[in-house]
Amino acid sequence: MDTTIEKGMTRRDFLAGCTALAGSALLGGGAAPCVSPRLRIGVLSDIHVTKREDSGTFEKALRWFLEQGVDGVLVTGDLVTRGTIAELEAVADTWQRVFPGDLAPDGRRVERLFLLGNHDVDGFVSAASWPHRQVPSREEAERTCIAFHREETWRRLFGEDYRQIAVKEVKGYRFVLNSWVSRALGEHDALEEFWSAFAPTIDPSRPFFYCQHPHPKDTCAAGYLLGGAFWGGGWDDGASTRLLSRHPNCIALSGHSHYPIDDERSIWQGAFTSVNCGCARGFAFTFPGRENGHAVPDMKAGTTFQMPPLDFRRIRQGMLMDVFDDRVVFHRREFVNDRQLGPDWTVPLGLGATRPYEFEPRRRASRPPRFPDGAAVAAAGREDGRNRKGEACAQVCVSFPPAEGAFDYEVCAVEKIADFTRICASKRVFAPDAFLGVADGGAQVECVFAKDELPAGGELRFAARPFNCWGRPGSAIASDWATI
Protein backbone atom coordinates (compact mmCIF):
# COMPACT_ATOMS: atom_id res chain seq x y z
CA MET A 1 0.00 0.00 0.00
CA ASP A 2 1.32 3.41 -0.93
CA THR A 3 1.19 4.94 2.54
CA THR A 4 0.94 1.90 4.78
CA ILE A 5 2.39 2.73 8.16
CA GLU A 6 4.32 0.13 10.10
CA LYS A 7 5.19 0.94 13.69
CA GLY A 8 4.35 4.60 13.19
CA MET A 9 6.29 5.40 10.02
CA THR A 10 6.41 5.05 6.24
CA ARG A 11 9.40 3.81 4.29
CA ARG A 12 9.74 7.38 2.98
CA ASP A 13 9.85 8.72 6.56
CA PHE A 14 12.44 6.08 7.51
CA LEU A 15 14.70 7.03 4.61
CA ALA A 16 14.22 10.73 5.30
CA GLY A 17 15.09 10.18 8.95
CA CYS A 18 18.19 8.19 8.05
CA THR A 19 19.28 10.92 5.63
CA ALA A 20 18.81 13.59 8.30
CA LEU A 21 20.68 11.43 10.82
CA ALA A 22 23.58 10.94 8.44
CA GLY A 23 23.68 14.64 7.66
CA SER A 24 23.76 15.48 11.36
CA ALA A 25 26.62 13.05 11.92
CA LEU A 26 28.59 14.43 8.98
CA LEU A 27 28.15 17.96 10.23
CA GLY A 28 29.10 16.85 13.72
CA GLY A 29 26.37 18.88 15.41
CA GLY A 30 23.47 18.44 17.78
CA ALA A 31 21.22 15.57 18.66
CA ALA A 32 19.85 13.41 15.86
CA PRO A 33 16.25 14.19 14.87
CA CYS A 34 13.58 11.65 15.75
CA VAL A 35 12.77 9.04 13.10
CA SER A 36 9.27 8.17 14.33
CA PRO A 37 6.68 10.94 14.38
CA ARG A 38 5.94 12.65 17.67
CA LEU A 39 2.33 13.11 16.61
CA ARG A 40 0.06 11.56 13.99
CA ILE A 41 -3.27 13.18 13.04
CA GLY A 42 -5.91 12.11 10.52
CA VAL A 43 -7.14 15.16 8.63
CA LEU A 44 -10.50 15.60 6.88
CA SER A 45 -12.81 18.42 5.91
CA ASP A 46 -16.34 18.77 4.59
CA ILE A 47 -17.56 15.28 5.42
CA HIS A 48 -21.18 16.51 4.93
CA VAL A 49 -22.96 13.66 6.66
CA THR A 50 -26.71 13.86 6.03
CA LYS A 51 -27.75 10.62 7.73
CA ARG A 52 -26.15 7.48 9.07
CA GLU A 53 -26.35 5.76 5.68
CA ASP A 54 -24.35 8.61 4.08
CA SER A 55 -21.40 8.37 6.47
CA GLY A 56 -19.62 5.62 4.55
CA THR A 57 -16.59 7.63 3.43
CA PHE A 58 -16.26 9.20 6.87
CA GLU A 59 -16.26 5.79 8.51
CA LYS A 60 -13.88 4.38 5.91
CA ALA A 61 -11.45 7.23 6.54
CA LEU A 62 -11.73 6.82 10.32
CA ARG A 63 -10.98 3.11 10.09
CA TRP A 64 -7.93 3.80 7.90
CA PHE A 65 -6.76 6.39 10.42
CA LEU A 66 -7.26 3.79 13.16
CA GLU A 67 -5.02 1.36 11.25
CA GLN A 68 -2.34 4.06 11.03
CA GLY A 69 -2.33 4.57 14.80
CA VAL A 70 -3.42 8.21 14.85
CA ASP A 71 -3.37 10.29 18.02
CA GLY A 72 -6.34 12.35 16.87
CA VAL A 73 -8.65 13.17 13.97
CA LEU A 74 -9.25 16.70 12.73
CA VAL A 75 -12.35 17.68 10.71
CA THR A 76 -12.19 21.33 9.68
CA GLY A 77 -15.91 21.98 9.46
CA ASP A 78 -19.05 21.10 7.54
CA LEU A 79 -19.63 17.98 9.56
CA VAL A 80 -23.19 17.97 8.20
CA THR A 81 -25.11 19.45 5.26
CA ARG A 82 -28.46 20.85 6.38
CA GLY A 83 -27.41 21.93 9.84
CA THR A 84 -29.69 19.55 11.73
CA ILE A 85 -29.16 17.86 15.07
CA ALA A 86 -30.12 14.52 13.51
CA GLU A 87 -27.23 14.81 11.07
CA LEU A 88 -24.77 15.60 13.84
CA GLU A 89 -26.06 12.56 15.73
CA ALA A 90 -25.10 10.46 12.68
CA VAL A 91 -21.59 11.97 12.82
CA ALA A 92 -21.29 11.14 16.52
CA ASP A 93 -22.63 7.59 15.99
CA THR A 94 -20.04 6.98 13.26
CA TRP A 95 -17.22 8.29 15.43
CA GLN A 96 -18.32 6.10 18.34
CA ARG A 97 -18.41 2.98 16.15
CA VAL A 98 -14.73 3.44 15.34
CA PHE A 99 -13.44 5.21 18.46
CA PRO A 100 -15.89 4.35 21.29
CA GLY A 101 -15.34 6.69 24.20
CA ASP A 102 -12.66 8.47 22.10
CA LEU A 103 -10.43 5.41 22.49
CA ALA A 104 -8.59 3.08 20.14
CA PRO A 105 -8.97 -0.68 20.74
CA ASP A 106 -5.67 -0.70 22.67
CA GLY A 107 -7.03 1.90 25.11
CA ARG A 108 -5.12 4.88 23.71
CA ARG A 109 -7.03 8.16 23.63
CA VAL A 110 -7.73 9.45 20.14
CA GLU A 111 -8.47 13.17 20.34
CA ARG A 112 -11.54 14.36 18.47
CA LEU A 113 -10.68 17.69 16.86
CA PHE A 114 -14.01 18.78 15.34
CA LEU A 115 -15.13 22.30 14.51
CA LEU A 116 -18.23 23.73 12.85
CA GLY A 117 -18.50 25.09 9.31
CA ASN A 118 -21.09 27.18 7.50
CA HIS A 119 -23.36 24.21 6.72
CA ASP A 120 -23.33 23.22 10.38
CA VAL A 121 -24.61 26.55 11.70
CA ASP A 122 -26.17 28.28 8.68
CA GLY A 123 -27.44 25.30 6.71
CA PHE A 124 -30.98 26.05 7.83
CA VAL A 125 -31.07 29.29 5.78
CA SER A 126 -29.46 28.00 2.60
CA ALA A 127 -31.85 26.69 -0.03
CA ALA A 128 -28.89 25.02 -1.75
CA SER A 129 -28.36 22.96 1.38
CA TRP A 130 -31.85 21.49 1.17
CA PRO A 131 -32.03 19.73 -2.21
CA HIS A 132 -35.60 19.20 -3.39
CA ARG A 133 -36.92 20.81 -0.22
CA GLN A 134 -37.96 24.24 0.86
CA VAL A 135 -36.00 26.21 3.43
CA PRO A 136 -37.42 25.24 6.85
CA SER A 137 -39.58 27.64 8.75
CA ARG A 138 -37.96 29.52 11.61
CA GLU A 139 -40.04 27.46 14.03
CA GLU A 140 -38.82 24.19 12.51
CA ALA A 141 -35.21 25.42 12.43
CA GLU A 142 -35.30 26.44 16.10
CA ARG A 143 -36.54 22.98 16.96
CA THR A 144 -34.29 20.81 14.77
CA CYS A 145 -31.09 22.72 13.89
CA ILE A 146 -27.67 22.79 15.53
CA ALA A 147 -27.39 26.58 15.47
CA PHE A 148 -30.04 26.96 18.16
CA HIS A 149 -28.78 24.09 20.36
CA ARG A 150 -24.99 24.09 20.02
CA GLU A 151 -24.06 23.91 23.71
CA GLU A 152 -26.50 21.24 24.80
CA THR A 153 -26.08 19.14 21.62
CA TRP A 154 -22.29 19.24 21.74
CA ARG A 155 -22.27 18.24 25.42
CA ARG A 156 -24.74 15.38 24.83
CA LEU A 157 -23.01 13.96 21.75
CA PHE A 158 -19.34 14.61 22.49
CA GLY A 159 -19.16 14.91 26.27
CA GLU A 160 -17.46 18.31 26.33
CA ASP A 161 -18.41 21.98 26.44
CA TYR A 162 -18.93 23.74 23.14
CA ARG A 163 -16.78 26.79 22.50
CA GLN A 164 -16.68 28.87 19.36
CA ILE A 165 -12.88 28.90 19.68
CA ALA A 166 -11.44 25.94 21.55
CA VAL A 167 -7.82 25.05 22.26
CA LYS A 168 -6.85 21.39 22.59
CA GLU A 169 -3.45 19.90 23.28
CA VAL A 170 -2.42 16.54 21.81
CA LYS A 171 0.90 15.09 22.97
CA GLY A 172 2.23 18.56 23.67
CA TYR A 173 1.06 20.18 20.39
CA ARG A 174 -1.68 22.79 20.46
CA PHE A 175 -4.65 22.98 18.09
CA VAL A 176 -6.80 26.10 17.89
CA LEU A 177 -10.27 25.13 16.63
CA ASN A 178 -12.20 28.17 15.38
CA SER A 179 -15.81 27.32 14.49
CA TRP A 180 -17.96 29.25 12.03
CA VAL A 181 -20.17 31.92 13.53
CA SER A 182 -23.71 32.23 12.23
CA ARG A 183 -24.12 35.21 9.94
CA ALA A 184 -27.82 34.44 9.72
CA LEU A 185 -28.11 34.98 13.48
CA GLY A 186 -25.86 38.05 13.50
CA GLU A 187 -23.19 36.50 15.70
CA HIS A 188 -19.91 38.20 16.56
CA ASP A 189 -16.56 36.84 15.36
CA ALA A 190 -14.40 36.61 18.48
CA LEU A 191 -11.06 35.84 16.78
CA GLU A 192 -9.42 39.22 17.41
CA GLU A 193 -10.38 39.19 21.08
CA PHE A 194 -9.28 35.57 21.48
CA TRP A 195 -5.94 36.17 19.76
CA SER A 196 -4.97 39.08 21.96
CA ALA A 197 -5.02 36.66 24.92
CA PHE A 198 -3.72 33.57 23.12
CA ALA A 199 -0.78 35.04 21.17
CA PRO A 200 1.43 35.75 24.23
CA THR A 201 1.23 32.07 25.19
CA ILE A 202 2.61 30.80 21.86
CA ASP A 203 6.01 29.08 22.04
CA PRO A 204 7.84 30.24 18.87
CA SER A 205 10.12 27.19 18.97
CA ARG A 206 7.25 24.71 18.43
CA PRO A 207 4.65 24.42 15.68
CA PHE A 208 1.02 25.01 16.51
CA PHE A 209 -2.02 24.29 14.37
CA TYR A 210 -4.70 26.86 13.67
CA CYS A 211 -7.86 25.26 12.26
CA GLN A 212 -10.92 26.94 10.77
CA HIS A 213 -13.40 26.18 8.01
CA PRO A 214 -12.57 28.76 5.28
CA HIS A 215 -9.05 29.19 3.99
CA PRO A 216 -7.17 32.20 5.38
CA LYS A 217 -7.40 34.80 2.62
CA ASP A 218 -4.54 35.06 0.12
CA THR A 219 -3.09 31.66 0.99
CA CYS A 220 -3.80 28.12 -0.25
CA ALA A 221 -5.93 27.36 -3.33
CA ALA A 222 -5.83 31.05 -4.30
CA GLY A 223 -5.09 30.98 -8.02
CA TYR A 224 -5.48 34.76 -8.15
CA LEU A 225 -2.13 35.04 -6.36
CA LEU A 226 -0.54 33.81 -9.60
CA GLY A 227 -2.15 36.47 -11.76
CA GLY A 228 -5.60 34.96 -12.23
CA ALA A 229 -8.91 36.57 -11.36
CA PHE A 230 -10.29 36.49 -7.81
CA TRP A 231 -13.46 34.46 -8.23
CA GLY A 232 -14.64 34.45 -4.61
CA GLY A 233 -15.61 31.63 -2.31
CA GLY A 234 -13.39 29.57 -0.05
CA TRP A 235 -11.56 32.33 1.85
CA ASP A 236 -12.26 34.39 4.94
CA ASP A 237 -12.19 38.18 5.25
CA GLY A 238 -8.43 38.32 5.84
CA ALA A 239 -8.40 38.69 9.64
CA SER A 240 -6.83 35.27 10.21
CA THR A 241 -4.08 35.93 7.64
CA ARG A 242 -3.17 39.18 9.36
CA LEU A 243 -3.02 37.56 12.81
CA LEU A 244 -1.24 34.35 11.76
CA SER A 245 1.38 36.27 9.78
CA ARG A 246 3.02 37.16 13.09
CA HIS A 247 3.71 33.47 13.75
CA PRO A 248 5.97 31.64 11.27
CA ASN A 249 5.58 28.49 13.36
CA CYS A 250 1.84 28.36 12.59
CA ILE A 251 0.37 25.73 10.27
CA ALA A 252 -3.20 26.66 9.30
CA LEU A 253 -5.57 23.86 8.28
CA SER A 254 -8.84 24.63 6.51
CA GLY A 255 -11.44 23.40 4.00
CA HIS A 256 -14.69 24.94 2.74
CA SER A 257 -13.66 25.47 -0.90
CA HIS A 258 -14.13 21.76 -1.81
CA TYR A 259 -11.04 22.22 -3.93
CA PRO A 260 -9.07 19.00 -4.65
CA ILE A 261 -5.83 18.57 -2.72
CA ASP A 262 -3.87 16.93 -5.53
CA ASP A 263 -3.57 20.44 -6.97
CA GLU A 264 -0.19 21.65 -5.66
CA ARG A 265 -1.67 25.08 -4.97
CA SER A 266 -3.42 23.50 -1.99
CA ILE A 267 -0.38 24.17 0.18
CA TRP A 268 1.00 27.71 0.53
CA GLN A 269 3.82 29.26 2.49
CA GLY A 270 4.42 32.90 3.19
CA ALA A 271 4.64 34.37 6.68
CA PHE A 272 3.09 31.07 7.88
CA THR A 273 1.97 27.78 6.29
CA SER A 274 -1.58 27.21 5.05
CA VAL A 275 -2.96 23.83 3.92
CA ASN A 276 -6.22 22.99 2.17
CA CYS A 277 -7.70 19.83 3.69
CA GLY A 278 -9.90 19.05 0.68
CA CYS A 279 -13.34 17.47 0.72
CA ALA A 280 -14.20 14.01 2.02
CA ARG A 281 -17.86 13.89 0.93
CA GLY A 282 -17.52 14.62 -2.77
CA PHE A 283 -19.06 17.54 -4.69
CA ALA A 284 -15.62 18.96 -5.44
CA PHE A 285 -15.37 22.36 -7.10
CA THR A 286 -12.83 23.55 -9.65
CA PHE A 287 -11.58 26.85 -10.94
CA PRO A 288 -14.03 28.35 -13.48
CA GLY A 289 -14.06 28.07 -17.24
CA ARG A 290 -13.38 24.36 -17.79
CA GLU A 291 -15.75 22.70 -20.23
CA ASN A 292 -16.33 19.72 -17.92
CA GLY A 293 -15.60 21.47 -14.61
CA HIS A 294 -17.84 22.28 -11.66
CA ALA A 295 -17.51 25.91 -10.57
CA VAL A 296 -19.95 28.27 -8.86
CA PRO A 297 -19.11 31.28 -11.12
CA ASP A 298 -19.93 29.21 -14.21
CA MET A 299 -23.25 28.13 -12.70
CA LYS A 300 -24.16 31.67 -11.71
CA ALA A 301 -23.25 32.95 -15.18
CA GLY A 302 -25.52 30.37 -16.79
CA THR A 303 -22.72 29.32 -19.14
CA THR A 304 -23.77 26.72 -21.72
CA PHE A 305 -21.11 24.04 -21.89
CA GLN A 306 -21.17 21.18 -24.35
CA MET A 307 -20.01 18.66 -21.74
CA PRO A 308 -21.58 17.58 -18.45
CA PRO A 309 -19.41 18.09 -15.37
CA LEU A 310 -17.20 15.23 -14.32
CA ASP A 311 -18.59 13.15 -11.49
CA PHE A 312 -16.95 15.23 -8.78
CA ARG A 313 -19.03 13.37 -6.18
CA ARG A 314 -16.37 10.66 -6.48
CA ILE A 315 -13.64 12.97 -5.20
CA ARG A 316 -13.25 11.99 -1.54
CA GLN A 317 -9.94 13.07 -0.14
CA GLY A 318 -8.10 13.45 3.15
CA MET A 319 -4.62 13.42 4.69
CA LEU A 320 -2.45 11.85 7.33
CA MET A 321 -0.28 14.41 9.12
CA ASP A 322 2.94 13.32 10.82
CA VAL A 323 4.77 15.75 13.11
CA PHE A 324 8.48 15.20 13.68
CA ASP A 325 10.98 17.33 15.58
CA ASP A 326 12.25 18.91 12.37
CA ARG A 327 9.36 18.64 9.92
CA VAL A 328 5.65 18.06 9.36
CA VAL A 329 4.72 15.58 6.63
CA PHE A 330 1.32 15.47 4.88
CA HIS A 331 0.40 12.20 3.17
CA ARG A 332 -2.42 12.95 0.71
CA ARG A 333 -4.96 10.20 0.03
CA GLU A 334 -8.20 9.61 -1.83
CA PHE A 335 -10.77 7.19 -0.47
CA VAL A 336 -12.36 5.99 -3.73
CA ASN A 337 -9.48 3.94 -5.11
CA ASP A 338 -7.44 4.16 -1.88
CA ARG A 339 -4.48 5.75 -3.61
CA GLN A 340 -1.90 8.32 -2.68
CA LEU A 341 -2.36 11.74 -4.28
CA GLY A 342 1.05 12.85 -5.45
CA PRO A 343 4.24 13.14 -3.39
CA ASP A 344 4.10 13.96 0.30
CA TRP A 345 4.30 17.59 1.37
CA THR A 346 7.17 18.04 3.84
CA VAL A 347 7.21 21.30 5.79
CA PRO A 348 10.56 21.99 7.53
CA LEU A 349 10.35 23.22 11.13
CA GLY A 350 12.57 25.39 13.26
CA LEU A 351 13.86 28.94 13.30
CA GLY A 352 15.32 29.82 9.92
CA ALA A 353 13.76 26.77 8.23
CA THR A 354 13.39 26.92 4.47
CA ARG A 355 9.92 27.52 3.03
CA PRO A 356 9.65 25.19 0.04
CA TYR A 357 5.95 25.81 -0.62
CA GLU A 358 5.92 29.43 -1.69
CA PHE A 359 3.86 29.75 -4.86
CA GLU A 360 6.08 31.70 -7.25
CA PRO A 361 9.33 29.70 -6.84
CA ARG A 362 7.39 26.49 -7.35
CA ARG A 363 5.78 27.85 -10.50
CA ARG A 364 9.19 28.77 -11.91
CA ALA A 365 10.67 25.38 -11.01
CA SER A 366 7.70 23.28 -12.18
CA ARG A 367 8.11 20.84 -15.05
CA PRO A 368 5.86 21.22 -18.09
CA PRO A 369 3.57 18.24 -18.69
CA ARG A 370 4.41 15.85 -21.51
CA PHE A 371 2.34 13.70 -23.84
CA PRO A 372 3.55 10.13 -24.37
CA ASP A 373 5.48 9.43 -27.54
CA GLY A 374 3.22 8.83 -30.50
CA ALA A 375 0.20 10.53 -28.88
CA ALA A 376 -2.32 11.77 -31.42
CA VAL A 377 -5.51 13.82 -31.54
CA ALA A 378 -8.68 12.47 -33.16
CA ALA A 379 -11.91 14.29 -33.99
CA ALA A 380 -15.32 12.86 -34.86
CA GLY A 381 -18.69 14.46 -35.53
CA ARG A 382 -21.91 13.35 -33.89
CA GLU A 383 -25.32 14.58 -34.89
CA ASP A 384 -27.18 13.34 -31.80
CA GLY A 385 -25.17 15.23 -29.16
CA ARG A 386 -26.59 17.11 -26.18
CA ASN A 387 -25.11 20.01 -24.26
CA ARG A 388 -24.99 20.33 -20.47
CA LYS A 389 -28.52 21.72 -20.40
CA GLY A 390 -29.76 18.62 -22.21
CA GLU A 391 -30.45 20.48 -25.45
CA ALA A 392 -29.93 18.53 -28.66
CA CYS A 393 -27.16 19.81 -30.94
CA ALA A 394 -24.66 18.54 -33.47
CA GLN A 395 -21.19 18.27 -31.93
CA VAL A 396 -17.56 17.48 -32.66
CA CYS A 397 -15.77 15.30 -30.10
CA VAL A 398 -12.00 15.71 -29.85
CA SER A 399 -10.04 13.01 -28.00
CA PHE A 400 -6.41 12.34 -27.07
CA PRO A 401 -4.40 10.44 -24.41
CA PRO A 402 -3.58 12.07 -21.06
CA ALA A 403 -0.23 13.82 -20.55
CA GLU A 404 2.08 13.13 -17.64
CA GLY A 405 1.90 15.91 -15.05
CA ALA A 406 -1.10 17.64 -16.64
CA PHE A 407 -3.66 19.55 -14.59
CA ASP A 408 -5.88 20.48 -17.53
CA TYR A 409 -5.76 20.95 -21.32
CA GLU A 410 -6.34 23.70 -23.83
CA VAL A 411 -8.01 22.38 -26.98
CA CYS A 412 -8.05 24.65 -30.02
CA ALA A 413 -9.80 24.42 -33.36
CA VAL A 414 -7.45 25.80 -36.05
CA GLU A 415 -8.87 27.01 -39.33
CA LYS A 416 -6.92 27.08 -42.62
CA ILE A 417 -7.58 30.24 -44.62
CA ALA A 418 -5.71 30.77 -47.90
CA ASP A 419 -2.03 31.13 -46.94
CA PHE A 420 -2.39 31.29 -43.14
CA THR A 421 -4.07 29.59 -40.19
CA ARG A 422 -5.93 30.98 -37.19
CA ILE A 423 -7.50 29.68 -33.99
CA CYS A 424 -11.26 29.89 -34.40
CA ALA A 425 -12.33 28.30 -31.09
CA SER A 426 -10.65 27.13 -27.89
CA LYS A 427 -11.67 25.45 -24.64
CA ARG A 428 -10.13 24.15 -21.41
CA VAL A 429 -10.97 20.68 -20.17
CA PHE A 430 -10.03 18.22 -17.41
CA ALA A 431 -9.16 14.57 -17.92
CA PRO A 432 -12.06 12.26 -16.94
CA ASP A 433 -10.10 10.76 -14.03
CA ALA A 434 -8.76 14.08 -12.77
CA PHE A 435 -8.28 14.27 -9.00
CA LEU A 436 -8.66 10.51 -8.49
CA GLY A 437 -5.02 9.59 -8.05
CA VAL A 438 -4.84 7.37 -11.14
CA ALA A 439 -1.39 5.80 -11.02
CA ASP A 440 -0.78 4.73 -14.60
CA GLY A 441 -2.17 5.89 -17.92
CA GLY A 442 -5.79 6.89 -17.61
CA ALA A 443 -8.83 7.27 -19.80
CA GLN A 444 -8.79 9.27 -23.02
CA VAL A 445 -9.35 12.99 -22.58
CA GLU A 446 -12.33 14.43 -24.45
CA CYS A 447 -13.33 17.95 -25.40
CA VAL A 448 -16.62 18.67 -27.15
CA PHE A 449 -17.44 21.58 -29.45
CA ALA A 450 -20.86 22.41 -30.83
CA LYS A 451 -20.72 22.39 -34.61
CA ASP A 452 -22.14 25.90 -34.67
CA GLU A 453 -19.11 27.04 -32.63
CA LEU A 454 -16.92 26.10 -35.60
CA PRO A 455 -16.74 27.59 -39.11
CA ALA A 456 -18.81 25.79 -41.72
CA GLY A 457 -16.87 24.08 -44.52
CA GLY A 458 -13.17 24.45 -45.01
CA GLU A 459 -10.41 22.50 -43.33
CA LEU A 460 -9.86 22.31 -39.58
CA ARG A 461 -7.40 20.65 -37.28
CA PHE A 462 -7.58 20.33 -33.51
CA ALA A 463 -4.59 20.91 -31.23
CA ALA A 464 -4.31 19.89 -27.56
CA ARG A 465 -1.81 21.48 -25.18
CA PRO A 466 -1.38 20.27 -21.58
CA PHE A 467 -0.89 22.66 -18.65
CA ASN A 468 0.31 21.93 -15.14
CA CYS A 469 -1.46 23.45 -12.13
CA TRP A 470 0.90 26.45 -12.23
CA GLY A 471 -0.22 27.32 -15.76
CA ARG A 472 2.99 26.12 -17.40
CA PRO A 473 2.29 24.58 -20.82
CA GLY A 474 3.79 21.50 -22.41
CA SER A 475 4.18 20.82 -26.12
CA ALA A 476 0.99 20.49 -28.15
CA ILE A 477 -0.12 17.63 -30.35
CA ALA A 478 -2.58 18.02 -33.23
CA SER A 479 -4.89 16.10 -35.53
CA ASP A 480 -4.61 15.95 -39.28
CA TRP A 481 -6.40 18.53 -41.38
CA ALA A 482 -9.96 17.50 -42.23
CA THR A 483 -13.28 18.93 -43.31
CA ILE A 484 -15.82 18.63 -40.51
Image (cartoon, rainbow, N blue to C red):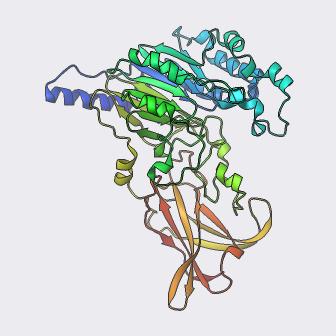
Say whether residue 381 is left or right of residue 20: right
Residue located 59% across and 21% down the image: 114
Q: Is residue 153 above or below residue 277?
A: above
Q: In which quarter of the image is residue 189?
A: top right
Q: Quadrant of residue 424?
A: bottom right
Q: Where does residue 376 sit, x and y in percent of width and height?
A: 52, 70
Q: Nearer the viewer, residue 213 or 232?
A: 232
Residue located 66% across and 27% down the image: 79
Residue located 46% across and 45% down the image: 264
Q: Is residue 139 above or below residue 275?
A: above
Q: In this view, does 205 lie above or below 155?
A: below
Q: Where does residue 24 sit, x and y in percent of width and height?
A: 19, 27
Which quadrant of the figure contains the C terminus?
A: bottom right
Q: How many labels does the image show?
A: 0
Q: Which of 220 and 194 is in front in this view?
A: 194
Q: Where does residue 297 sit, x and y in percent of width and height?
A: 65, 52
Q: Nearer the viewer, residue 302 or 344?
A: 302
Q: In which quarter of the image is residue 283?
A: top right
Q: Where does residue 225 sit, x and y in percent of width and height?
A: 46, 48
Q: Is residue 187 visible?
A: yes
Q: Is residue 55 visible?
A: no
Say whether residue 361 is left or right of residue 275: left
Name of the residue lying farthest toward the bottom: 418
